[in-house]
Image (cartoon, rainbow, N blue to C red):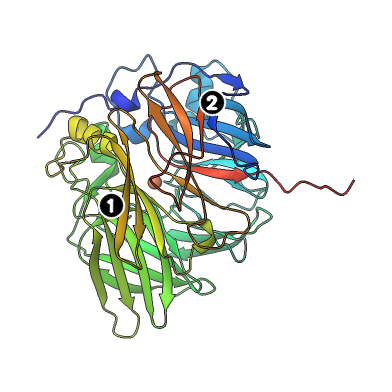
């Protein structure tokens, strides 16, 4: 047994102010082609009047954004997403479409751009919140009346079709659902996936022909865990763990058994003849530590599903503790050579300190990024140094890119000397070289979850 302590400490200490700053100082040169916004979502503590320890996943959603234009860093903003509880706590009017506070969950997990709009996302069958360009909350969105229920934290954009795929939970059913959102932002497919035991599904993967469904060893255990104010999930390996391949235009899922495990995040997936290759960050256990989240060290693993024999081959690609796997958006659903992940020492140390990890022994002195070359089975580590915590990186292909890793990596990195954070722009090819640009933000960006580079709509230069 262990004691639940406040998770909103250290790198996760919330920030109190919403800040707007213009024309930020930059070291290096921001590539002129990077016109758009780098946005990242994350949990920012709970209500000030509620001193009870709560789970990191339950923190209010705060989006931190930097707007780049013509080689300049035009603004930094951070804004709480006005879910029902946040609007009430701030004394503001409820936003349109927001669910009643009792069932409204902070959309704190991801932020994406789609159909020239911006959405803050969370799993669990809840609607996304639409944000304005300046990341003010517009309201909860139902994709112009086309979203039947909730959306998901980790949709995947098909770079060929422009369609957004998601595996979603439903509030009123145990079934999962495969949704496809058109490039124009309307749901054009909704297919139920029967799963009677309510698996925790955080992410999915996409291939040319399949949506990859993760039905693993974590399942929703609502009543028991909510009573303890922890994440409402339990470890259950009694019913096995399996990967589902749902034809993107069909309804029958093919299921393939794997060893008991839990996966928050996929790196990518692709087809190789009759085989489907799925790369994931895999935990051998999760939600198993008694009163809190017992888990074990996450590694980068590969599943090769043989759709003829029905067998899955599981191999370890990298045994260092890591999270937040990312690939170029250009290779989503296709073969990938490179992957990027975060040696999230601050995250893992934080979990160890606040949530009683049994098996986690992070070794790195400071936070670091890993670039994986999966063709050569090699990797490169970029360390930032003690106290310089970072998180997920977003890969942005360079215009006219000549290779898969010809592009930029964007991430927030904390600078303990300034007591504030930087937006760092790295060359993915020159992974350990000096940053191309470092944008110095006026404030600290707490460690968080997921983000996106959202390019501006293509300018009409016809006048
Ligand atoms: Fe996630």
Q: Can residue 174 be seen in this view?
A: no
Residue designated by label 1: 219
* Ligand 1 has an atom within 8 Å of the beta carbon of the residue at disc 1: no
Measured as percent of width and height from the top left, residue 161 is found at 62, 65
Quadrant of the image containing the C terminus: top right
Q: Is mark 2 on a helix, strand or loop?
A: strand
Q: Is residue 88 visible?
A: yes
> Residue at 27% of width from left, 29% of height from top?
386
Label placed on residue 32: none
**Is residue 439 or residue 356 the one in the foreground?**
439
**Residue 134 position (above or below residue 303):** above
In the displayed structure, does residue 385 sit left or right of residue 164? left
**Is residue 459 or residue 279 the one in the foreground?**
459
**Is residue 5 or residue 103 the one in the foreground?**
5
In the displayed structure, does residue 83 sit left or right of residue 356? right
> Residue at 49% of width from left, 56% of height from top?
328
**Residue 432 position (above or below residue 278):** above
Residue designated by label 2: 79
Measured as percent of width and height from the top left, residue 306 is found at 32, 80
């Amino acid at each position: 047994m262990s004691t639940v302590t406040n998770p909103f400490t250290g790198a996760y200490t919330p920030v109190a102010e919403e800040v707007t700053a213009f024309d930020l100082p930059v070291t290096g040169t921001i590539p002129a082609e990077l016109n758009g916004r780098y946005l990242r979502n994350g949990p920012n503590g709970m209500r000030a009047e509620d001193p009870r320890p709560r789970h990191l996943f339950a923190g209010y959603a705060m989006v931190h954004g930097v707007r780049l234009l013509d080689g300049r860093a035009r603004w930094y903003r951070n804004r709480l997403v006005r879910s029902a509880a946040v609007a009430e706590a701030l004394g503001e009017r409820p936003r349109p479409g927001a669910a009643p506070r009792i069932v409204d969950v902070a959309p704190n997990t991801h932020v994406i751009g789609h159909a020239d709009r911006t959405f803050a996302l969370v799993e669990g069958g809840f609607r996304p919140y639409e944000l304005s360009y300046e990341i003010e909350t517009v309201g909860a969105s139902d994709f112009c009346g086309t979203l039947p229920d909730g959306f998901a934290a980790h949709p995947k954009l098909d770079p060929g079709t422009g369609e957004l795929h998601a595996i979603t939970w439903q509030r009123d059913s145990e079934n999962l659902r495969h949704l496809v959102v058109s490039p124009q932002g309307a749901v054009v497919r909704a297919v139920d996936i029967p799963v009677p035991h309510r698996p925790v599904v955080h992410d999915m993967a996409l291939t040319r022909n399949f949506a990859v469904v993760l039905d693993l060893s974590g399942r929703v255990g609502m009543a028991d865990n909510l009573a303890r104010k922890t994440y409402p999930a339990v470890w259950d390996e009694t019913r096995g763990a399996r990967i589902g391949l749902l034809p993107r235009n069909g309804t029958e899922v093919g299921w393939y058994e794997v060893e008991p495990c839990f996966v928050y995040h996929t790196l990518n997936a692709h087809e190789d003849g009759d085989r489907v290759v799925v790369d994931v960050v895999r935990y051998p256990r999760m939600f198993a530590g008694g009163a809190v989240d017992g888990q074990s060290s996450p590694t980068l693993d590969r599943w090769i599903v043989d759709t003829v024999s029905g067998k899955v081959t599981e191999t370890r690609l990298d045994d260092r503790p890591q999270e937040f796997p990312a690939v170029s958006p250009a290779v989503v659903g296709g073969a990938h050579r490179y992957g990027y992940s975060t040696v999230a020492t601050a995250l893992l140390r934080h979990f160890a300190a606040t949530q009683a990890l049994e098996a986690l022994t992070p070794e790195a002195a400071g936070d670091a990024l890993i670039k994986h070359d999966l063709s050569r089975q090699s990797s490169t580590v970029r360390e930032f140094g003690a106290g310089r915590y970072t998180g997920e990186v977003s890969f942005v292909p360079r215009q006219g890119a000549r290779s898969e890793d010809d592009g930029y990596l964007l991430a927030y990195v904390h600078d303990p000397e300034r007591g504030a954070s930087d937006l760092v722009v790295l060359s993915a090819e020159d992974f350990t070289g000096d940053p191309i640009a470092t944008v110095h933000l006026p404030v600290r960006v707490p460690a968080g979850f997921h983000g996106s580079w959202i390019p501006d709509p293509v300018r009409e230069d016809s006048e």
